[in-house]
Structure formats: C-alpha cells, structure tokens
Amino acid sequence: MANLKAIRGRIKSVKNTGQITRAMQLVATSKMKRAQDKATAGQPYVVLLGEIFSSLASRITDLKHPLFEEREVKKRGILVVSTDKGLCGALNANLFKEIIKLEGDIGYVTVGRKASQFISRTKRELMADFPVSDKVQYAEVRGIVQYMTEAYLDGKIDTIEVLYSSFVNTLVQEPLHVPLVPIDDFRKRFEELKSTLNISLADTHGDDREMMFEPSVEGIMEKLPELYLKQCIFQSMLGAKASEHSARMVAMKAATDNAKKLVGDLTLEYNKARQAAITQEILEIAAATASNSD
C-alpha cells in the first residue's frame, strides 16, 4: 500500500507540472506570433535602407565617415542579445558556445540577464548591460547604439559586432554573428545580410538616374550610417525575441507531452501494483480459508 501511495503522489505531481508547462506553452504561443510578425515585418526595411545606403555611397567618390574608417583591431566590441528568462531549450546554451569560441581582447555589451550572468561568471569583460522590455521598442535601441558608437569613436573598441539567436522558423533558431562596424566593404556585407534574412529583392547596383537629394548626398550620408547601424541592431533584437518565444513554445510543448506520457506510464504502473496487491490479498484469504477447513 505504501508503494501505491507513492505512485499516486508522483502522478499528482507530474499532472501539476504538466498543467504549468501547458499554461506556459499557451502564453509563449501567443507571444510567439506577435514577435514573429514584428521580426518578419522589419526585414524589408533593413534591406531597403541598405539599398538606399549603397546607392548613395556609389555617388560619392571620396566617402569619409568615422564608421567607414578601417583601423588596427586591438579590441573588439560585441553586443550579445540573450533572454532574461530560461525554459527555452538550448537557445542560450548555443549562443554561449559561440562566445566560448571567440578569441582575443573583447569587450561585451549585453542585452538579457542570461548573457550578462554568463559573461560575469566566465570572467569576461562586461562593458555594459542594457535591459529591454518583452515588446522591444525602437527607443530602447538608441541608448545601446549611442554607447557602442561613442566607445568606438573614443577608441575603447575597434569593432561593433552583434551576436544573437537568428529566427529561421518556429523549430529552428541559429546563433548569428554579424560584424557591423567598420563598414569597410558595405556591398559584401549587405549581400550577406540579404542572404541571412532570406529576402529576395533587386540586386544592389550603382544608381545612374538623375536624382536630387536634399540637403545633399554628403549631408544624408553623415546620418545614414548610424541610422543603418541602429536599424540592424533593432532587427537583431526583434529576431532574438522571435527566437526566444518560439524556442520556449517548443520546449514547453515537449515538456507537456513528456508529462502526459509519464502520467500514462505511472498510471499503468499503479494499476499493475494495485492488481498485484489485490491478487495477494485474494491468495492470503484463500490460504486462510483452506487452513481453517483443514
């Protein structure tokens, strides 16, 4: 009987856990759709902004901008975008494996508590940590871009790179490492970006049409690199959120399915144990009856 009581306790515990994971699965599912829509909707804007960037750059023979200047890389600056919470499968673990592979002098800027904890725990240099809301807002990106741009211009870092979980589809999220600054080979970087986003748009060409720009091409190009950098980082954060909610939904669904299977196995075990106990009681009664009759 003690064994039956223990099995009943386990069944109750697993059922309660299954209810929790089911609730988390439903919450993640609702958030996942919104996050995926936002990430997908922002991709064409990044690509079209790159088209404009490339078109304007082709019109300037002597393009000078601090974000375009190549220099000796003594220290890299990498923005790592992770999650604040766990229960999302191997999403963060795969991201941290990429960090472990990185070599050299690197300063890390993090978004998400899991990344900042990992950087601190592994004794790497954490330059800054920026909190963002679950529904990422464009305004939240400004502080990150401003901090990293100032660090780059002041010579504290010699590159601006971003490492995040790229959203491929609901079942697949892959760590993606994207170098952003210096923008030394924009055309090549832009083609890689389009390939990464899996968007088929017109190839980037030098635009030979007669067009007028106000105030001027040079004036626009003063502001455009920072705008492009800001949009790329914003898009990476949207993709990371879509990856997070997708991974959590899949993980919670797997946990719920496993809980159901375990309840079924425990119920079968309970029924077998109960049947064995009843059979034992019947045998004891039969033996006692036979003994009395003798």
Image: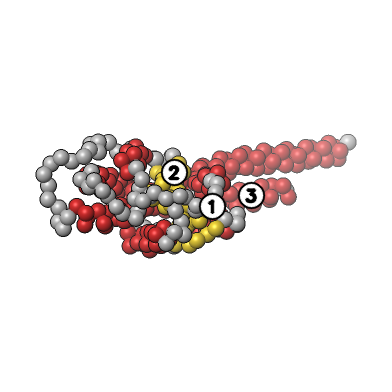
From the image, which quarter does the C terminus lie in?
top right
The amino acid beneath tag 3 is Arg
Marks 2 and 3, how far apart in space? 41 Å
Q: CB atoms at circles 2 and 1 under 8 Å apart?
A: no
Q: CB atoms at circles 3 and 1 under 8 Å apart?
A: no
Task: Locate residue 127 relative to residue 223 in the image: left or right.
Answer: right
Mark 3, residue position:
10
Q: Position of residue 172 (x, y in %)?
A: 44, 39
Mark 1, residue position:
105
Q: Secondary structure at mark 3?
A: helix
Tell me if residue 150 comes above or below residue 193 in the rendering: below
| Neighbourhood count class around disc 1 (C-alpha, 10 Å): few under 14, some 14–19, many 20 upward | few
- In-front residue for pair 267/235: 235
The amino acid beneath tag 1 is Asp
Q: Position of residue 258 (x, y in %)?
A: 55, 42
Marks 3 and 1, how far apart in space? 51 Å
Task: Locate residue 293 relative to residue 245 in the image: left or right.
Answer: right
| Neighbourhood count class around disc 3 (C-alpha, 10 Å): few under 14, some 14–19, many 20 upward | some
Q: Which corner quadrant of the image does residue 154 belong to?
A: bottom left
- In-front residue for pair 266/103: 103
Q: Position of residue 250 (x, y in %)?
A: 46, 44
Kindly tell me whether residue 132 is visible in this rendering. Answer: no
| Neighbourhood count class around disc 2 (C-alpha, 10 Å): few under 14, some 14–19, many 20 upward | some
N-terminal label among 2 and 3: 3
Label drawn at residue 176: 2
- In-front residue for pair 204/293: 204
Nearer to us: label 2 or label 3: 2
Q: Residue at horizontal 34%, vertical 39%?
A: 188
The amino acid beneath tag 2 is Leu
